[in-house]
Structures are given as C-alpha cells and as structure tokens.
Image (tube, grey):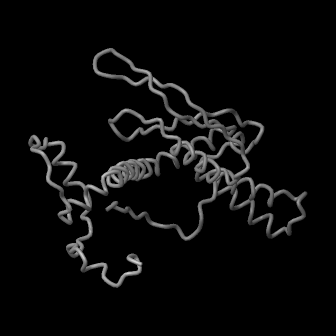
Amino acid sequence: MRKTKTRMKTSKPYESILLKARKLAAMADPANGAAPAEIEAAEKALAELVARYHIKPDDLDESKREMHLLICKSRFRDQPPKLDKNLAYFARVCFAYIVGDINRKTRIFQTEIELPTRGLAVKMRQVHAVEAFCTECEYSEWKECFEHYAPDFIEMNDELRREKAQAAFNFKHSWSNFCGENDIMPPLPDAPEPTLADKLKAMSLPKAPKVSPWQKGGKLAGSNLLT
C-alpha cells in the first residue's frame, strides 16, 4: 500500500509574488482611475512587498524576460536520472502555477546532461527539460516550487511504476495462480526443484479466491448451462 504524505494546506491558493506586485503597481497608477484611498493602500502594500522580497524594477519589467531552462531530473536521489516525461509535465504545471498564467508558452524536449561517476569518468544521460520565457525572479520561484514537490512526485511515480509491473505479472500468471490455489492440477512429469527466483515470484502473487471443489454431476445440476 502506498504511503501518503500530508502537507500543510494554506488558506489561499498560491499567488506569484511578481504577479501580486504587478497588480498592486497597476492599482497604484493614477491613470487607472482608482480612488485616492485605494491608490494609497496599493502603494503601501507594494512598498512592503518590494522590501520583503527584495524585488527589483527589472523583476517587474516583462520586457526583461529571457529564455530559461529547467532540467527535469531528480536532484534528490543517488540513482541515475530516468527519462520521465511525467516529471516534465509536472514542471510545466509548476511554471503556470508560479506565473499565474496557464497560457504562457513552454516547450518540453529531450537533452543530455553530464553525470559524474566514480573516478574521472563522466557519463551522458538523456533527460527531459522545459524551457520558458521568464524573468530571473520568476525562474527562481519556478525552480524552488519544482524542487519542493519533486521528491514526493518522483517517489509516487516510482511506486506506481512498480505496481504497474507487478499488476502485469499477476495478470499474465492469473490462470496458474487460480489453478494452484484450487488444486486444479493434472499429473505432471517430474520437474526440477524451483529456483529461488521462481519461489520469490510465487510469493508476490495476491491470494486467489478459494472455491468449493468441483464434483461431476453435482455443482451444475439444474443450471441453464446444461440445456
């Protein structure tokens, strides 16, 4: 059974710091026709936000967006990275979540990264990457958000992958499991002792239903299968 982890839920959905700052800046602009009290409140909130998060003018300037690349691999495990497109899809959702705009374009593609090994050897491994136009601050938030959730997402994906492989094995051998559990065993020639691998596979199968033994002329008497 998969272990579930719970995270503390916030009272409100996440809102990008930059998106919030842009909204406050728009409200504080007299050209937008806001009331003086609203403009003053927006200016005060914007000043507090800028001071708290050290926001620079370039962070709010959409013309300062540049192409940034997020490599979608596990940075949290010793195992080699997997070519997992699900992780790239997850990173793309994180980007839209951070910038507050699902229509901002992103591109998913495959690339290679260097993977240091023991000694001086370096291997190249295939991974997915996501690229998007964003400011330095947006990229920093995007990367932090992705790396916060990625370990649990990767762990869930790995477990689902194992469950999928086990389910495929169980389905392939369901006839054997059912027959063995219900003693539907014809005489077999002498066979060699099962290997340890065979024994371990048999132990991993779920328990099949136990059915009352079949008796000729008894169980199907009166059934419409005989007419």
- Left/right placement of residue 125 relative to residue 20 reads left
How many numbered badges does the structure rendering display? 0
Q: Position of residue 187 (x, y in %)?
A: 14, 53
Residue under the image location 38 percent in, 41 percent down: 76
Residue under the image location 32 percent in, 36 percent down: 78
Q: Quadrant of residue 225?
A: bottom left
Q: Quadrant of the N terminus?
A: bottom left
Q: Quadrant of the C terminus?
A: bottom left
- Left/right placement of residue 114 relative to residue 101 reads left
Above or below 68: residue 42: below
- Left/right placement of residue 194 relative to residue 116 reads left
Nearer to the camera, 80 or 55 = 80
Q: Position of residue 166 (x, y in %)?
A: 33, 51
Q: Position of residue 194 (x, y in %)?
A: 12, 44
Nearer to the camera, 150 or 125 = 125
- Left/right placement of residue 74 relative to residue 88 reads left
Q: Quadrant of residue 123?
A: top left
Above or below 87: residue 30: below
Above or below 129: residue 204: below
Above or below 110: residue 94: below
Q: Residue furthest bottom?
A: 222
Q: Position of residue 145 (x, y in %)?
A: 52, 49
Nearer to the camera, 190 or 63 = 190
Q: Residue furthest top?
A: 120
Residue under the image location 44 percent in, 26 percent down: 125
